[in-house]
Amino acid sequence: MIKSKAVTFGGWALIVGALSFTAVFTYLAITFNYPDVLDGPANEVLPALRGGGDAMRAIWAVYAFLPLAFVPAGIGTYHALKAADEGTMRLGMHMATISALASMLGLMRWPSIHWALAAFYEQADAAQQAVVTAVFNGLNVYLGNYIGEFLGELTFGLWLLLTAVTMFKSRHFPRWMAYMGLLTSVLGLIQMFRNVTDIVLPVNEVFNYLLPLWLLVLGIGVLRFARNHEGFSLQNEN
């Protein structure tokens, strides 16, 4: 039987996640020069972080937990498409979970470790500030670039890719959705190399606009699937 509750929850997780990410991203872009601030020096970024006060810290805390929405989203897409290719979608579900955890770990440094570093930086002397800067830079490279951005975005892109590929095998999703998902996932896997080369920066710009739209479309498609197949069983479509 189709687990309609899991599919429905996954569809809503996609929609709420897309809208929430867009709202928080926009707020941080306006108030904190995000995402350009990620490449800023400690002597500019840390005072700006503290200057935002408790509201800034709260927003970063919310942002850090938003990737967890993709855990139920991965489960929902798995149940919606497993009849078409269960093995591929099971792998996709695991990719979504890894992506959520990696992205969360990367973002959590801002309201936790970076916040504490910013508080210490205000009272530190020049020598101590140099140490804080080294720690700040190291955390950005490890938790930011490698864990959050590279691992998180790699597994996220693979989840979207596996979902799109499986859609081509399913008779319950239109082919235009599969093509849109394929395009989004490929752009996502390309733009993740923006820290390596500036060549992919235009791809990153397109992806940032396309991704929330695709998540909304996918969420609506998953919800429609849940509504149309509630109480019914699906035979393997292969």
Image: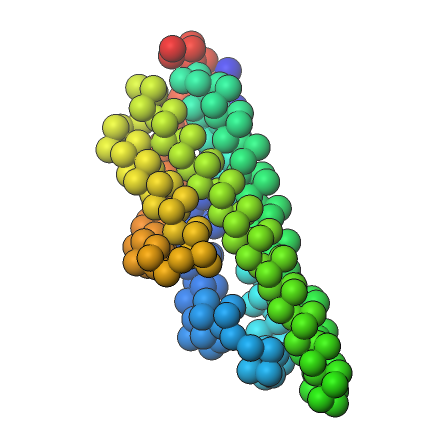
| Percent position of residue 228, x then y | 36, 24
Residue at the image position 42 percent from the left and 9 percent from the top? 235
Towards the viewer: 107 or 191: 191
Residue 68 visible here: no
Q: Quadrant of residue 110?
A: bottom right
Q: Is residue 114 above or below residue 154?
A: below
| Percent position of residue 159, x then y | 47, 36
Q: Does residue 163 appear left or right of residue 134 in this picture?
A: left
| Quadrant housing the C terminus | top left
Q: Is residue 221 above or below residue 120?
A: above
Q: How many marks?
A: 0
Q: Does residue 142 appear left or right of residue 131 in this picture?
A: left
Residue 210 visible here: yes
Residue at the image position 60 percent from the left and 51 percent from the top? 147
| Percent position of residue 35, x then y | 46, 67
Q: Does residue 18 appear left or right of residue 183 in this picture?
A: right
